[in-house]
Image (cartoon, rainbow, N blue to C red):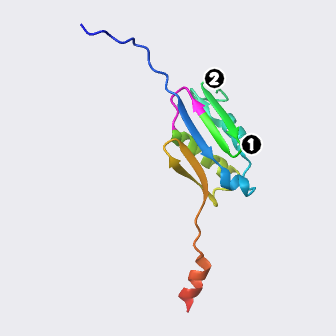
Amino acid sequence: MPARKSPKAKKEQHKFVLDCTHPVEDGILDAALFEQFLHERVKVKGKTGNLGNSVTITREKEKIHIVADIAFSKRYLKYLTKKFLKKNNLRDWLRVVANSPTSYELRYFQINNEDEENEEGDE
């Protein structure tokens, strides 16, 4: 008979990065406030403020690192980021873009000089 493996489940560790470099450099966004928002709003087992040892949120200059030892979706981070941007009235200028399978980046919307196009169309 083949040897059985122990039924212990592997503990997966999910690591995510939120890159806020551009808005922080321009003085639009405060990374410390964003980190505090995540600490207050991330839910673990259906309760906010219940991070414990299962989820750690750290900030290194303009980047926020999230490490979770439990099931944690990247999409949930995008949801919370968009919620923070809306709360601070930044949603009209910034968007959340995935730049790798484990990270998001805050970028500005690309605005193509609409005023110039309208003037050319009137002539």
Depth check: give the residue in front, 44 or 2: 2
Q: Position of residue 50 (x, y in %)?
A: 65, 26
For badge 1, the amino acid type reads Ala
Horizontally, residue 23 falls left or right of residue 77, namely right
Q: Which residue is mark 1?
A: 32
Q: Quadrant of residue 66?
A: top right
Dot 2 falls on a residue whose secondary structure is loop
List the residue tagged with mark 2: 53
Residue at 60% across, 76% down: 113
Q: Quadrant of the N terminus?
A: top left
69 is within the stretch colored magenta:
yes
Badge 2 amino acid = Asn
Q: CA distance from mark 2 to mark 1?
A: 21 Å
Magenta stretch holds residue 21: no
* Res. 9 image quadrant: top left
Which residue appears at 52% of the width and 28% of the height? 13
The residues colored magenta run 67-73
Q: Position of residue 44 (x, y in %)?
A: 59, 28
Mark 2 burial class by Cα count in 10 Å: few <14, some 14-19, many 20+: few
